[in-house]
Image: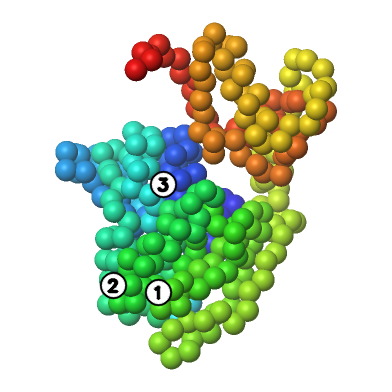
Amino acid sequence: DAFRSSGYDVMALGENSLTIESDGMAGLLGAARAGELPIVLSNIECGEEAVTATCEAGIAGLATQQVVVERSGIRVGVVNVVPEELTASIRARIRAGAELTAPLEDATARVDALRADGADLVVLVSNLDTNETAPRLTLDLLEGLGSDHAPDVVIATSTAQLVTQMQSTSGGTPVLTAAPGMLSQVVLRREGERWVIEESSEHELTGGEPQIAATVAGWNQEFCSQHDRPLAGDQLAAELDRAAFGQLVLRSMREQTSAEIAFINQRSVVDVGLFPLSGQLTSAKVHRALPNRTELRVARIKGA
């Protein structure tokens, strides 16, 4: 509802969307099925052992590999690629036998297809990088595409801590991103056969569309009613930064399971302007710092 109220034309799925609970993804796919919100995911196809009818009822059949949106006589084509390794993280019910394929091959094919279809502006959304890898994997992809298959503009994820705008070495393709909590607006100008950035600006996502504000306020109220409760214990003895909070989680895991070793993915702890933590620790703060729903698994393994 929020996407539609905002006037979005296309949704490009990334890791956060692909790995959410099945019910949440079902809602997104339902909107795509009804034609209300085109979902683009370029590097996915039904696996060799998948039952075609079953597979096409899931993400592979409802996401489209390329989208063309026409505005004011300009045909804008959109391509979106994600890491191939995410296949195992997509819920089985949604994946339905589909598999993510090599981003470079699919990006090449989709960009070429959009050019052949007469797209005036080709936008490549790169969901390849994390904060740890950005912008290397996106730039590697552009280098692999070369000038013959390069898009006109790249919108990259997880590069906000490094850059908000840069030019790739492959044909001077503009690479754009937005800082967390910001809406990035870019004005492009065509110069001969290429598009260049004329101006860009960032806007804080505050206020805005009343319908969206009301929807988010409802979510906040529901979340706080469930989770804004103090955890056992008194005030924190000292401030906790992101690393110290991660150590607290690991220590708690070991105590809860009587384990000698505990480990988590470093990216499981998310910094959303929450750190340093101080005062009373609440379950709401823990949920914000550890937003991904997961399970605590215990195993007995050999030292070797």
Residue 202, quarter of the rendered image: bottom right
Specify whether residue 54 is in view. yes
Q: Local crowd at mark 3 within 10 Å, few (<14), some, or many (≥20)?
A: many
Q: Which residue is mark 3?
A: 29
Q: Which mark is residue 170?
A: 1
Q: CA distance from mark 1 to mark 2?
A: 16 Å
Image vertical order of residue 209 relative to residue 216, above or below:
below
Foreground label between 1 and 2: 1
In the rendered image, residue 77, in percent from the top left (x then y), is placed at: 39, 71
Give the SS element for disc 3. Answer: helix
Q: Is residue 261 left or right of residue 90?
A: right
For residue 272, above or below residue 154: above
Look at discs 3 and 2 and give the one toward the viewer. Answer: 2
Q: What residue do we see at 68% from left, 30% from top?
A: 244
Q: Which residue is mark 2?
A: 112
In the rendered image, the residue lying farthest to the bottom is 192
Amino acid tagged 2: Asp
For disc 2, the neighbor class at 10 Å (few under 14, some 14 to 19, many from 20) is: some
How far is mark 3 from mark 1, CA to CA? 35 Å
Spatial CA distance of label 3 from label 2 is: 27 Å
